[in-house]
Image: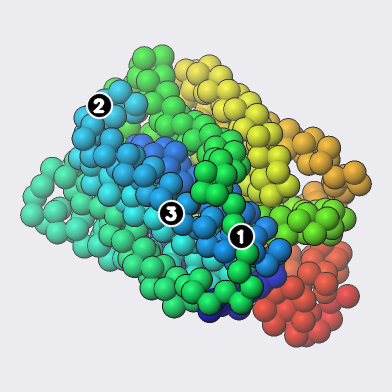
Amino acid sequence: MAKAKEQNYLHGAAIMTAGVIIMKILGALYKIPLGNMLGDDGYGLFLQAYYVYSVFLTLATAGFPVALSRMISAAQTRGLQMQARRTYRVAWWTFFTLGVISSTVMFVFPDWLSATLIHSPDAALSIQALSPAVLLCCITATYRGLTQGYENMTPTTVSQILEVLAKVAAGLALAAYLIKAGYDQPKVVAGAIFGVTVGSLAALLYMIVYKMRNYRFDTVSEPDIPESAGTILKNLLSIGIPIALGSVVLSLINLVDAGLCMTRLQDAVGYSYSHANTLYGVYGKAQTLFNLPAAFITPLTISVVPAISAKLVLDKKDEAGKISEDSLRISMALALPMGIGLAVLSEPIMKIIYPGANEAGPALLCILGIASVFVCFSLISTAILQATGYEKLTLYSIVAGGLVKITVNWFIVAIPSVNIYGAAIGTVCCYLTMCVLNVIFINRRFSKGMSLKNIFIRPAGPSLVMGAIAYAVYYGGMMLTGSGSKLMMAAFMCAAILVAVIAYAVAVIKLRVITADDMKLIPKGEKVAKLLHMS
């Protein structure tokens, strides 16, 4: 079988992270102009439809790509190529079936979904525009799960970049055309969100071509006898269903959050539908930025699953434990500075990126910046539990976090002086609960346990110093100049970020938060370590 070169887990994560940087730049070219074109209320409509789509996409795909990656990794570690081929084929038809069902429901019942789930009838057309994307993403997920099982993250990265490129081009072009043509807001939003479907098609076409060229399974040197399709399906479901249920619950949390916030802001606080939608729209804009740190952690979560699974297949539990702790430490070394940076510079970030947004934006982003750290930890800790065969435990932590969020939102959003800020506070409480439970579960899985000092305390010091420096540079500069212009805000914000990044980089090297051994696992990392005199 022709096969692309495999990478170790940090090498693969580095490749995907480079892709994330490109995708986030492209995504900013999509969401920021779109948010300004649609306004707070239109962007709120966009997000509400997208949450419905996320639930169906998660229901159809979440868990199963992880299960496929794990099963392919186990098969290739043992040299069972026929087993890998049959596993892939069973997964393909399973994903296809789930995609057809989900897309059909979204296309046929958009009015019911929009009116019942999110209390926003205007979102029906957007839900319908997104319906084909679920099927396309399901099929794409099988190809990505296959290549990730071989610890090859390159095709996933390239396909994601193509997906975002097509989404940006199609979404912005359609939105601009519909606005110019004078269409009403629901049709404009539907046109903008149809870019997601176009992007999904682009990604699928690339993955089909890549699979045909590199993973044909037509030249197997030592044929093996694979398990029956029924056994493989049973294993796929036993691994995938608990993970999928957890992810569905997480998507449902966001969906309930949308409906709950809209309801409590209107019924309990007394805001009009329009004002409530505006507040939820600016909350959604803050969420777009809040999701940024998690995007840089996701590549690592994808890479560690096959890496840990392969070590456990070979009964190398100590090595699996080391990969787990290292991935948690590296995740926090990335997440803490990003989360603190968002919180400290929330005011200039929101005012520069979304100049016309509601005044609640900066405070919402400040709270969500702290929440993003817990989101990142929950992502990587969940991936570790999934890789070690304890995927059912992640469902418990997600359900617990969801219940906490719903409870907090119900009571706090209804307080007039708190209103929409309660949704952000609920997000902090939700993910903090998940993190605590995941730490308990992971420590039970590995006899040596995880070193919380290495994971949290070592990166926390440099991150706090970095945050203080960023705050001093930005607000000190603004105070000295006495200028409130957007240009000066942007200049001092960029200066604060640059100085803070340099200070943090020096601190993590001196305090050995990131070591030379870590750098050896990424492309050209050994040369970088020598250049920086890392030990």
Vertical placement of residue 366 versus 270, above or below: below
Q: Residue at x 90, y 44 (%)?
A: 447
- The secondary element bearing badge 1 is classed as loop
Of labels 3 and 1, earlier in sequence is: 3
In the image, taking residue 3 as reference, residue 191 lies left or right, namely left
Q: Position of residue 486 (x, y in %)?
A: 42, 60
Quarter residue 479 falls in:
bottom right
Of labels 2 and 3, earlier in sequence is: 3
- The secondary element bearing badge 2 is classed as helix
Q: Which residue is mark 1?
A: 225
* CA–CA distance in space, label 2 to label 3: 30 Å
Quarter residue 57 falls in:
top left
Residue count near mark 1 (Cα–Cα under 10 Å), binned few <14, some 14–19, many ≥20? few
Give the residue type at disc 1: Ile
In front: label 1 or label 2: 1
Image quarter where the N terminus lies is bottom right
Residue 112: mark in rendering: 2
- Do callouts 1 and 2 mark residues in contact (Cβ within 8 Å)? no
Residue count near mark 2 (Cα–Cα under 10 Å), binned few <14, some 14–19, many ≥20? some
